[in-house]
Image (spheres, helix red, strand yellow):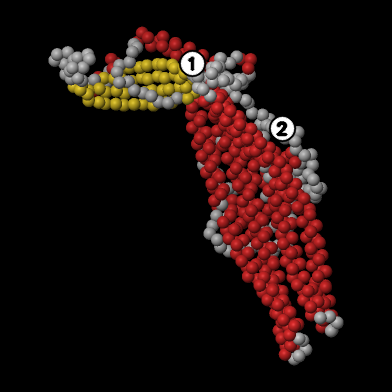
Amino acid sequence: MSVSDRTDAEPPSQPSPSEGEGEPSLACEAQCLYQSPLPLAGGGSGWGSNLRTTAIALAFAASLGACTVGPDYARPTVDAPEQWRIDYPQAADVANTKWWEQFGDPALDQLIETALRENKDVMIAAARIDQFIGALATTRSQFYPQIGYSLDASRNRSSRVGVPALPPGADEYYSLYQGALGATWQIDLFGRVRRQSEAAQAQVYASEQARRGVVLSVVTSVATSYIGLRALDRQLEIAFATAKNYGDTQRIFELRFTGGVVSQVELSQVQSQYQQALASIPALQQQIAAQENLISILLGRNPGPIPRGKTIDELGAPGIPADLPSALLERRPDILQAEQNLVAANANIGVAKSLYYPSLSLTGALGSVSAALGDFLSGPAAAWSVAAGLAGPIFTFGAIEGQVQSAEAFQRETLASYQQTVLNAFREANDALVGTVKKREESQAQTRRVAALREYARLSRLKFDNGYASYLEVLYAENELFSAELTAVRTQADGYTQVVNVYKAVGGGWVSQAAEAAPQPLLRSAADAPAGEAGASQSNGTK
């Protein structure tokens, strides 16, 4: 039940049923205490009355167990745009498929499969889930009595001049044997443990979404890195071909210079052009090595060569998913993770507010105490106790109020973080969709430019060979063609990368499919709700 805030100086009264409804469960927390150094008070005639008293206390505690202080979670309202900022060719249902297979490159498929299986960041994320599942199990244990045991044997000497003094002739040396089973049970009267469990469960779901986010990042990083690698390979091929062409031209000009046909100026121009092409080769080779090293780390292995498949010109183009902006709230791991963090922060307000209210503990012990080992298990050595304790704050001078204020402030921070995550998601998705359309247009223009420059270079050389132009015109045309060819390849790779960014921005069922192929948390059965549905189980606040 929801209970309004109290001040530390005014202990709260018992909540009334009209203040709300909570979960009708009895939360129990206990720790084992089982010792009985002396025979405990009580006998056979009092056992039945004590049982009745205990049963009444339990029934009373159960009637109060439905109280849960603190606000219940409701998903914040999000003003999602109705449409994306740009029209684009849409393909239905592709967001729930392994989109990277649409590139049609088995080498890329194998690299992604290896990365999902071996990537260290994915393994780290899976281990973090196990950490939160362990914390959840610890929190949930407080719902139940904690049972323990104790055994003790001692040899003692009593003082003859103590108070009371030993009778004359009494042996000051004696042995004492004790053994007991004990249980302690703290009744969750005002939902402190229930709120702690709610927060811990939300943290488990948040860590699962964080794992899915790592999977999303690994898949898209491998895809974009591989595309970049194939683009660099193509640029290196262009550089080698251009350098070979320039080298052949330089040899011809050297012969012409020897024969006095061309001047030293023209020869120097050709030599400069050739060296420029040669200088581009080491730079591209260095970038290729760095790209291979990056992919190797994504694969969870030492830096090394990466197998290739199709050339960048042979790669297919995945379709773009047809989804509305509101779908991101249910599909992006970072949004779902931020929401679960908000759920946990909201529950922790209830944990803090529960400190205003009293706590009820039930303890019990059953065992034997004897001065002779032979009598340890006999009837007269039996000892037991049953007790109930109630404790609560009166004056804390702001200690509890400060914890409540801190929890509420953190909830506001987490809410703003969730809202910011949603806004960033809409921005990234729009950026990727606009980038996909515009990069395709840019790539088409660059292709036409390369074709025009190739014709320009051919005609310029033809004019030079016939004596109608200087070699400076040829040099300019061929340099422009070389640069344009390299730029066209980069633009083509950027177009593929933008498509990958669309899938990264919108998420979808493909993330869950990829996550199934990645290392799983060892304790996953403790997190009962499906990872992709944790956020969807809350009330929907999308407009």
Q: Is residue 302 above or below residue 389?
A: below
Residue 112 falls left or right of residue 426 = left
Residue density around tag 1, few if under 14, some if 14–19, many if 20 or more, within 10 Å: some
Q: How many marks?
A: 2
Residue drawn 79% across and 59% down?
442
Q: Quadrant of residue 384?
A: top left
Q: Quadrant of residue 165?
A: top left
Residue drawn 75% across and 64% down?
488
Quadrant location, the C terminus? top right
Residue at the farthest front position: 397
Percent coordinates x, y for residue 32 in the rendering? 40, 26
Residue drawn 31% across and 26% down?
151
Residue density around tag 2, few if under 14, some if 14–19, many if 20 or more, within 10 Å: few
Residue drawn 75% across and 91% down?
259
Residue denoted by label 1: 58
Question: Is residue 534 visible in this depiction of the protein?
Answer: no
Mark sitting on residue 282: none
Foreground label between 1 and 2 = 2
Query: How far is mark 1 from mark 2, CA to CA?
Result: 41 Å
Percent coordinates x, y for residue 464 in the rendering? 82, 81
Element at label 2: loop
In this view of the protein, which residue sits in the foreground, 97 or 317? 317
User: Which amino acid lies under the numbered mark 1 shown in the image of this protein?
Assistant: Leu
Residue at the farthest left position: 169
Element at label 1: helix
Residue at the farthest right position: 468
Residue 52 falls left or right of residue 319 = left
Percent coordinates x, y for residue 129 in the rendering? 54, 40
Residue denoted by label 2: 77
Q: Is residue 22 above or below residue 511?
A: above
Question: Is residue 169 visible in this depiction of the protein?
Answer: yes
Q: Quadrant of residue 175?
A: top left
